Image: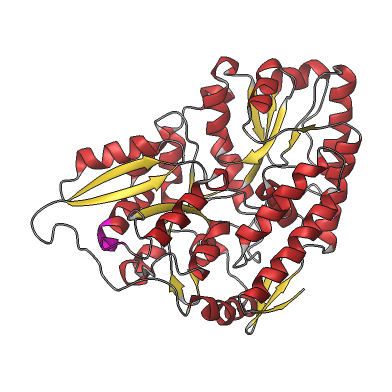
Amino acid sequence: MSRSWSTWKRTPFVAVGALTALAVLTACSGGDGSTGAPGADGKPVDVTFWGWAKGTKEVVDAFNASHQNIRVKFEEIPSGNAGGYAKISNAVKAGNAPDLVSIEYPMLPEFVSQGSVQDIGSLFGDDVKKKFLPQAVELTTLGGKHWAVPFDAAPQAFYYRKDLFAKYGVEVPKTWDEFRTAAEKVKKADAKARIGTFFPDDPTTFQAMAWQAGAQWFKAEGDTWKVNTTDPATTKVSAYWQKLLDDDLVRNNASFSPEWTNSLKSGGTIGYVGAAWGAGVLKGTLPEQSGKWGVAPIPSWDGKTASGMLGGSTFAVPKNSKKAAAAVEFAMWMTTTEAGVKARIASGTSSAFPAATDLRPAAKKAFDAAFYGGQDIYQVFEEAGGSIDPRWTWGPSTGTTNSVIKDQFGKVTHGGTTIADAVKAGHDATVAELKKRGLKVEG
């Protein structure tokens, strides 16, 4: 039976250990105590906001149309790993960062450790925290301080072409062994078709699968970080996907690239291992295939419901902003009100799965599921979300980890290295980076 989000509790060992280790890296982090209370001088407070999530412009427009005390100016930037994080970091260093930015859960500890964002705990009380699933609050609370407003959760899901699975006589896989069998059947039925894709540019997809398998790359014990990306669970996932690549059973394309998109459009790729937010991506990318796609639980190793979390966004206030209160008020509206969620999802491009649990019915109602034949896709997300192992912790140097793994994954395409080698390179680079920062590390 799946655990519900509301029953999640981290073990005391993990929580206390993380507090101690993170206290070291948050000791010099940003925040000057200014709040910039909205409307304090009787004039609207202008807030600048950088982000990239689908439906964001519509959310900003809806907020500005319904609020007089705060005016939000939105600038769309590249997604984090595509240059967005570098842009934010450079702006913070130059002293011209906006008042609010999108930061995914994996990268938040990195920004906190660099002193780039403010502690917003004084603006984020326990009454507000109760609105969000505990895991999201834990992932945004580091060193006993609260650094961001959670937006969505991102449980995994498997998207598949219902018509082509039926045509090829392929059953929707429930286990990873069945996924390989299904991949073989797809290729046998159509030599040009594949069941899915390995994304060499996106370590987070691989990390979510390692998470699902039971891996724990980062652990905090006392004041020491323990790093292990070569544990049995990760090794199993690495070997599995390496074999799929070696046997030419999945594609090897960059995520959301023209090659990947064209393959989906042509029927050359008939499945997608993604996250809850991927439903909106497919819907917006392939409108001509409406009604042909279905959503299933991500395959697991034993057939029982299990999921990692692939991304998921938060909203943080850069350290130099003088308008923290106004920025947080806007962030709260986006994440805790029906109006905010409806504005985003009604855009037709977002399938966000809110971290605020009470808003899930509103999200489901706002999402036009015709693309999925009217399927209740939010029920799939709900069940997957309840199965995510809460023991996973992100380390304080995710940028280094992911940058190195991404670089090495790119070489897998050319046969120059293996997935396991790439992950080990990420491990070694992470340990070296943490030592360079003066942190205690084992690994």
Residue in the image at 77% along x and 49% along y = 408
Identify the coloring: secondary structure
The quarter holding residue 56 reads: top left
The number of discs equals: 0
Visible residue check, residue 10? yes
Residue 298 appears left or right of 82: right
Q: Is residue 180 magenta?
A: no
Visible residue check, residue 139? no
Residue 4 appears left or right of 38: right
The quarter holding residue 4 reads: bottom right
Residue 361, given in percent of the width and then of the height, sits at 44, 42
Residue 92, given in percent of the width and then of the height, sits at 41, 59
Residue in the image at 83% along x and 43% along y = 241
Q: Quadrant of the C terminus?
A: bottom right
Residue 45, given in percent of the width and then of the height, sits at 19, 53
Q: Quadrant of the N terminus?
A: bottom right
Residue in the image at 85% along x and 62% along y = 232
**On screen, 151 above or below 12?**
above
The quarter holding residue 243 reads: top right
Please identify the residue farthest to the front as the structure is shown: 94
Residue 341, given in percent of the width and then of the height, sits at 38, 42
**On screen, 371 above or below 434?**
above
Please identify the residue farthest to the left as the structure is shown: 42
**On screen, 396 above or below 441?**
above
Q: Which residues are magenta?
A: 321-326
Depth check: 17 or 43 in front? 43
**On screen, 110 above or below 412?**
below
Residue 358 appears left or right of 62: right
Residue in the image at 86% along x and 48% along y = 418
